[in-house]
Amino acid sequence: MTDLAVTLLLFFALVSTAIAIALLRSLFAVVMLSGVFSLLAALLFIAMDAVDVAFTEAAVGAGISSVLMLGTIALTARHEMKPKRWSATPLIIVGIIGAFLIYGTLDMPAFGDPNAPVQTYLNPDFIARTPKEIDVPNIVTAVLASYRGFDTMGEVAVVFVAGLGVTMLIGGSGGFLRRRYRETVLSRKDGQA
Amino acid sequence: MDHHLILRVVTRLLVAPILLFGLYVQFHGDFGPGGGFQAGVIFAVALILYGIVFGLSRLRSIFPDRWVMRLLAFGLLLYAGVGVVSLIQGGNYLDYNVLLPSAKAGQHYGIIVIELGVGITVFGVMMAIYYGFAGRPPSIEDTDW
């Protein structure tokens, strides 16, 4: 009963935050509210006993994303422009897609259903094997780091490439490209002057 | 943000506990929720908070740019290196059982080392992205918000 009340309250707060984000024009407020949205989502994950996911959501969604959004705002604009005229098309499209998504969830197994495919296929095997083979209390870590170690290495490589890409595009100050730019282009300009 | 006394004092108080918490999440990942991904982000958050409040140039003097790319690559190499070590020891790639004489101990050490690699890379990437965004010319003035 309390579970249901907490979940409903969190969902209500989530939806209110989302509506507020859609309505607000001040991008600073939008960024702050999206941080609130992530924190509420993290709380919801905790209510569903997914602590590892909640942890990531709180750290990445509420922490880093907000900082990066603020950085982006600092480089671009502080306020969203008012649309020239109001149009119903986006609302209708979003409504239809939302209706389809809700329709899709009707086929999904109920939350915590022991007969759901995800609970019957690989999970029992991991739960049975982890204490014998790996002997760490957190099975999530055992799956992530050992049974699926290769996948995780791919994920780290993806994160690595993302960092490289951002650095190459908008670059740190001491980077190779920036230095070459300074040496070639700027010195040429100086020469002309 | 020179005149924000409360922010400066609170940041001074918070940075060290956040770093400590990051280390806890990093090395406690086998026992509780968390692991390299979260720890790397938390560790970066402490430095980014410092950078926001005390200025980017002070952060840069503590944590220079050239370290960012090195850490980024080092984390991934550490992860991949564990796989190479297990190959040398005669096992499959990333098979931690062969790292130490006891299979379970090998698993424990393997997991700790690869989680450390994950944490270092994620930390490096977060710092790289932050430096990338925050280091561009128009710096944020208080009156802009």
Image (cartoon, coloured by chain):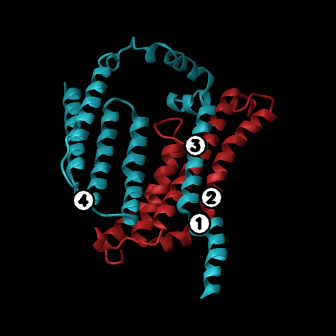
Please name the amino acid that badge 2 sits on. Met
Name the residue carrying label 4: A26
- Element type at marker 2? helix
Marked residue nearer the N-terminal end (3 or 4): 4
Q: Quadrant of residue A186?
A: bottom right
Mark 4: few/some/many CA within 10 Å (<14, 14-19, 20+): some
Please name the amino acid that badge 1 sits on. Asp
Name the residue carrying label 2: B69
Question: Which chain comes out red in the rendered image?
Answer: B
Q: Position of residue B133 (x, y in %)?
A: 47, 62
Chain A image colour:
cyan
Q: Residue furthest top?
A: A115
Answer yes or no: is residue B19 visible. Answer: no
For the residues bearing labels 1 and 4, Cβ distance under 8 angstroms = no
Q: Position of residue B21 (x, y in %)?
A: 46, 51
Q: Position of residue B55 (x, y in %)?
A: 44, 72
Marks 1 and 4 sit apart, C-alpha to C-alpha, by 32 Å
| Camera-nearest label, 2 or 3 | 3
Query: Left or right of A72: which side holds B113?
Result: right
Marks 1 and 2 sit apart, C-alpha to C-alpha, by 8 Å
Label disc, if present, on residue A80 of the rendered structure: none
Q: Residue at x 21, y 27 (%)?
A: A4
Label disc, if present, on residue B65 of the rendered structure: 1
Are tags 1 and 2 found on a single chain? yes
Q: Which quarter of the rendered picture does the N terminus of chain A lie within?
A: top left
Marks 3 and 4 sit apart, C-alpha to C-alpha, by 33 Å
Query: Left or right of A30: which side holds A59?
Result: right
Name the residue carrying label 3: A158
